[in-house]
Image (cartoon, rainbow, N blue to C red):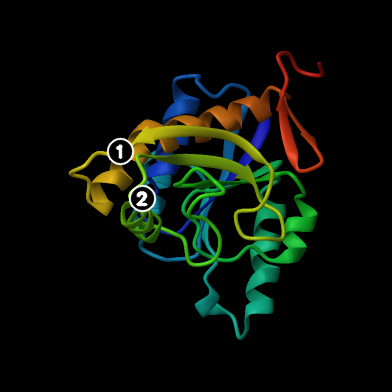
Amino acid sequence: MLNVAVLVSGGGTNLQAIIDAIADHTIQDARICLVLSNNRGVYALERARKAKLPSRVVSPADFPDREKFNEALLAAVKESGADLVVLAGFLCVIPEKMVRAYENRILNIHPSLIPAFCGKGYYGLKVHEAALARGVRISGATVHFVDSGTDTGPIILQKAVEVLPEDTPKSLQLRIMEQAEWKILPQAIDLIAQGRVAVEGRSVRILQQAGA
């Protein structure tokens, strides 16, 4: 059984997609061992409560400096017994020591087809604003492992979504969530739970069978 810690900062729509996928067995052999938020009062924590999942808040505001926060964040994840860490709209930079401790075991979902519209400054609606400003016809989402860079880790899955002429940043954001993010993030977790993801250098190979 794969123990998954889900890190959140806001509404938790991707968290809900994971909860639902575990409930309907789209994700097999995995359980959420912790929902951790860096913000109090966000709806993601209410989603965790409704699903009867363990949750806690580790906020930078509660620590004298960033280093103490980073230490507490890593300690909380380790205490949960997590095998896999999933960043589901988590808006804090993951400390280097955590990246090293969970090498190729931290997933992020990014709302574009990496390498387009990614890296520093590209998050939330800013991604979709940039895509529309550039006039792209296709956007989408990417699930990747986290490394020491920003959106530079090995890509696991991508899914394309059409950009419509009448799109606004918000409408495009919603379509990408519905058609891509909420599908490929649970799919990636399931593949990892089944032992079907092999990291080879900077790329990922999806195995047809575990250990193949």
Of the numbered discs in the image, which one, if any, rests on residue 175? 1
Tell me the amino acid under the disc marked 1.
Answer: Arg
Image quadrant containing the C terminus: top right
Determine the residue positioned at 76% across, 43% down. Answer: 202
Residue 198 versus residue 99 in the image, above or below: above
Residue found at the very far bottom of the displayed protein: 64
Q: Which element carries disc 1, helix, strand or loop?
A: helix
Percent of width and height locating residue 150 = 61, 60
Point out the residue furthest to the front here.
135
Mark 2 is surrounded, within 10 Å at the Cα level, by few (under 14), some (14 to 19) or many (20 or more) other residues, namely: some
Could you say which quadrant of the image residue 197 lies in? top right
> Residue shown at 70%/61% (left/top)?
75
Q: The residue under label 2 is which amino acid type?
A: Glu
Q: Tell me how far mark 1 sits from mark 2, CA to CA.
A: 24 Å
Residue at far left of view: 166
Image coordinates of residue 73 in percent, x first then y, are 64, 64
How many marks on residues?
A: 2
Crowd tier of the residue under label 1, counting other residues whose Cα lies within 10 Å: few below 14, some 14–19, many 20 or above: some
Q: Nearer the viewer, residue 209 or 2?
A: 209
Label disc, if present, on residue 184 of the rendered structure: none
The part of the image, by quadrant, that contains residue 164 is: top left
- Asked if residue 58 lies left or right of residue 191, the reply is left
The quadrant of the picture occupied by the N terminus is top right
Say if 180 sits above or below 79 in the image.
above
